[in-house]
Image: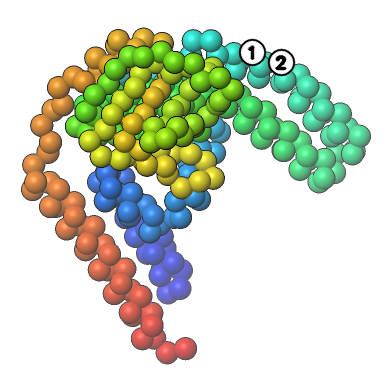
């Protein structure tokens, strides 16, 4: 019975997570916050993106999937840097393994070197694996593997081209009320939103902003896709059905907690 209860709780959490993912938007983020702390979720998502960068890149190239992919890789040299450090990591890992005689400590260190190698290549391939993506209703604007801003296209008020250098800055930069995602110290496309949207950053809670600047190899095409007509939103009946299902799942979980509390020790 204990195993059945644990399995049911895990299955319920998985279903709630799937419903939250399908729901999206602020309501989906609220459910995600209940399942996992925002900082932990941001770290886990960034780590997952880094470790799966190479498989995703290969799968995307082979299957030709994913809406409009708009790159920002001009001037980046991540793969060359990763290629330069690969022999050093491999040699060091092999030397330590042989010096320690192949015991469990040697295998732990070897595993750490393999993880370091995968992480290095995942981070280096980030701009190639995670371009800006513009879907029918949602746009995901990236700054490599670590930083991303997902916004409903209906919230985009304006998108303009203005090239600006951001010297000495990398990653996510906050400037007054604007968030910048520079690549090689440059941004080209500036966006303004009708309401604040969250920007993902590792080890921190999301940073909300109404203005965003990103890098782009083809600013005109990115602006055209972002400002294109947005399809009509799904009917309110569908939204009501999802909300009802989510409420039912929450009610079932509360009922399970009450039942557990009522059981004798």
Element on which disc 1 rests: helix
Q: Real-space Cα distance between discs 2 and 1?
A: 6 Å
Instruction: Identify the residue at image location x=44%, y=28%.
Output: 180
Measured along the vertical axis of the image, is residue 73 above or below residue 97? Answer: above
Quadrant for residue 118, please give it: top right
Where residue 70 appears, as percent x and y from the top left, is 36, 16
Q: Bin the neighbour count of mark 2 within 10 Å (Cα to Cα): few under 14, some 14-19, many 20 and up.
A: few
Instruction: Identify the residue at image location x=12%, y=46%.
Output: 238
Where residue 149 appears, as percent x and y from the top left, is 38, 33
Measured along the vertical axis of the image, is residue 170 above or below residue 163? Answer: below
Instruction: Identify the residue at image location x=52%, y=41%.
Output: 202
Left or right of 55 in this view: 116: right
Where residue 129 appears, as percent x and y from the top left, is 47, 22
Element on which disc 2 rests: helix
Q: Which residue occupies the foreground of this view, 83 or 134?
A: 134
Q: Which residue is mark 2?
A: 84
Q: Are marks 2 and 1 in contact (CB under 8 Å)?
A: yes
What colour-coding does the image apply?
rainbow
- Residue at the far front: name it: 176
- Is residue 44 among what the camera can see? no
- Is residue 166 among what the camera can see? yes
Q: Which residue occupies the foreground of this view, 238 or 1?
A: 238
Q: Bin the neighbour count of mark 1 within 10 Å (Cα to Cα): few under 14, some 14-19, many 20 and up.
A: few
Per the rendering, the mark at residue 107 is none
Q: Tally the numbered discs.
A: 2
- Residue at the far bottom: name it: 264
Where residue 215 appears, as percent x and y from the top left, is 42, 18
Instruction: Identify the residue at image location x=38%, y=79%.
Output: 260
Per the rendering, the mark at residue 80 is 1
- Image quadrant occupied by the N terminus: bottom left
């Amino acid at each position: 019975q204990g195993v059945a209860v644990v399995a049911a709780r895990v299955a319920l959490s998985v279903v709630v997570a799937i419903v939250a993912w399908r729901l999206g938007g602020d309501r989906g983020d609220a459910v995600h916050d209940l399942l996992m702390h925002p900082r932990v979720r941001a770290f886990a998502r960034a780590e997952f993106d880094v470790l799966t960068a190479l498989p995703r890149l290969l799968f995307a190239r082979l299957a030709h999937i994913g809406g409009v992919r708009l790159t920002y890789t001009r001037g980046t040299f991540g793969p060359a840097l990763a290629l330069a450090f690969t022999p050093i990591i491999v040699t060091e890992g092999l030397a330590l393994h042989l010096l320690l005689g192949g015991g469990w400590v040697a295998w732990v260190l070897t595993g750490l070197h393999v993880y370091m190698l995968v992480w290095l290549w995942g981070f280096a391939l980030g701009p190639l694996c995670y371009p800006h993506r513009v879907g029918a209703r949602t746009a995901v604007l990236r700054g490599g593997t670590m930083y991303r801003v997902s916004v409903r296209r209906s919230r985009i008020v304006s998108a303009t081209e203005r090239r600006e250098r951001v010297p000495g800055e990398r990653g996510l930069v906050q400037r007054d009320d604007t968030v910048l995602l520079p690549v090689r110290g440059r941004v080209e496309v500036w966006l303004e939103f009708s309401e604040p949207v969250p920007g993902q950053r590792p080890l921190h809670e999301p940073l909300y902003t109404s203005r965003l600047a990103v890098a782009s190899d083809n600013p005109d095409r990115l602006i055209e896709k972002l400002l294109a007509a947005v399809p009509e939103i799904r009917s309110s009946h569908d939204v009501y059905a999802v909300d009802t299902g989510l409420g039912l799942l929450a009610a079932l979980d509360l009922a399970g907690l009450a039942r557990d509390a009522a059981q004798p020790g």
